[in-house]
Amino acid sequence: MPDSLLKLTAPSDPKGRIVAIFVGAVLLPSIALSVLSFHAVPKQAEFQRIQMKKNAEKILHFIEEDLGHAARSKALQAAKVLGAERLLEGRPEVIRAALVDAGIGGDVFESLRLEASSPAARLAAVLGQRGGDIDSLEEALKAIDESSGGDEEDSLFLTGGDSKFVGVLRFRYACEYIHGELIREYFENEFANPEKAMVIRMSEPTGQLLYETAPTPDDRFEVKREMASPSFRGLKLALRYKDRSIEAEVRRWAIAKTMLIGFIDLMLGAGLFLVYSNVRREMQISKVKSDFVANVSHELKTPLALIRLFSETLELGRVHTEEKAREYYRVINKESQRLTQLINNILDFSRIEAGRREYRFGRADVTRIAEEVLDAYRFQIEQQGFRLEVALGEDVPELVVDKEALGQALINLLNNALKYSRDEKHVKVEVRRDGRRVLISVSDRGIGIPKSEQKKIFEKFYRAEHSLVHETKGSGLGLSLVQHIMEAHGGSVELESAPGKGSRFSLVLPVDEAGVA
């Protein structure tokens, strides 16, 4: 589609203003929303980072709770094996020997004992004061711990077969068992880590590694926690995500959100641009079609009016001399040829658009074709006050061409030369051979064509931006047809022109080695 159809309509065009207002009404709020979204992304990223940190801290808290639960479960199993009497006796050597006999091992616990005297009385007092609910039970255990040095040992309530309170089981695991067996057994058998997405490290207070779910070359753990229960006191838990750090994940999330917002904006902008350009293009095409119809109507009306005028004059016998009658006949013939040329252009354009334009090629003398066209149009050229200069070469070979189409192309060039020459009315037609090419040139000394428009003028409906062009009616199809005809012949159209210095159009036809196209 020519560039003229892509130009925006004039600001004064009401339809153009409506389209602009519509696009602005959609685009401006979208831009504002995008700006707000871009500003919100950093805040959302910070919130995401905080949430991921909190989730990681919760995971470490759950790990500590699970380890404490595992430790209490094993202590309870040991207590059930030993029985209340041995535990109440509380002598370490007796407990150790009983653990060995039970197959548990004597090096599992540093201490394992049962308290049931004053702590039990204190427990009963607390339960009596607070109604015996669960919270009161926990507070009672806390009171017992505080009175019995519980900071050094873990505590666990024991009940009998009739669910009556028996006592408080106090225990502390040996470091070797905690480090060597309990921790490893928990992480390998009980710890839930889907797809091993998290890496957990457990280390001594000194930093010595106890266990790690996956090797980590450096200390790049993002969340850390120090365990507080007596059996695990001082041990450190650390967590990192295997594939990406929290910071990297947040950064990736922010980039993804930003790209998504940008993509949505791009698609919205592209959609609005397409709507805007298509509506404006349709409006411009509509305007071009209206101009085309108006110009063609004018072009048809002028020769028809002259033909009618002179034919009526002849019919009424108002011409008294034979010379005057011949002049009227020449005018009628000239205008009919002009009318035929215009109709042929429109019909050829229609055939080209429909893909039905056919050419009849045959060997012909190009010089003779030019002579026939000039003989038919010489009167019209001279009547408009032009001086015609003809230069026909003698070494021009016969070529395989469509005589009618080539003549039509030359007629279009001649018509343009006559239309757009204002002051110096001079036309030169030249046919010559230039190496392996034959050139049919039409030169004038008219308004000329700027360099910026020399390609555009071959587009259909395009008319150059010049006052004389707009004063002169035309369909805007002539040069488009000329170019199509030359392409069908395997040739081209060359143009040499400058504003105010005239133009030179050349129909270029190829010549093969044998001198025949």
Image (cartoon, helix red, strand yellow):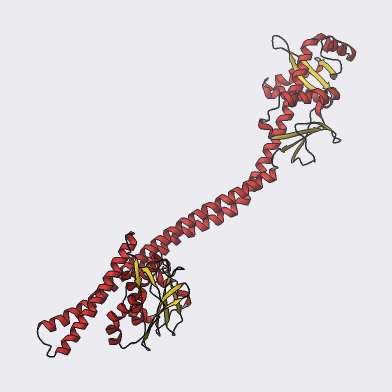
- Whole-percent x, y for residue 271 in the image: 46, 55
Q: Is residue 159 visible?
A: yes
Task: Name the foreground residue: 304 vs 385.
Answer: 385
- Residue plotted at (83% across, 16% down): 113
Q: Is residue 476 visible?
A: no
- Snapshot quadrant of residue 476: bottom left
- The image quadrant where one finds the C terminus is bottom left
Q: Quadrant of residue 359?
A: bottom left
Question: Where in the figure is residue 169, as x and y percent of width and height?
Answer: 79, 17
Seen from the viewer's position, the closer of residues 331 and 449 is 331
Q: Is residue 344 left or right of residue 234?
A: left
| Residue 26 falls left or right of residue 478 | right
Residue 40 vs 282, above or below: the answer is above
Residue projecting furthest to the right: 93
Q: Is residue 325 above or below residue 259?
A: below
Q: Quadrant of residue 104?
A: top right
Front residue of 219/477: it is 477
Q: Residue at x 46, y 68 (%)?
A: 513
- Horizontal side of residue 58 vs 269, given as left or right: right
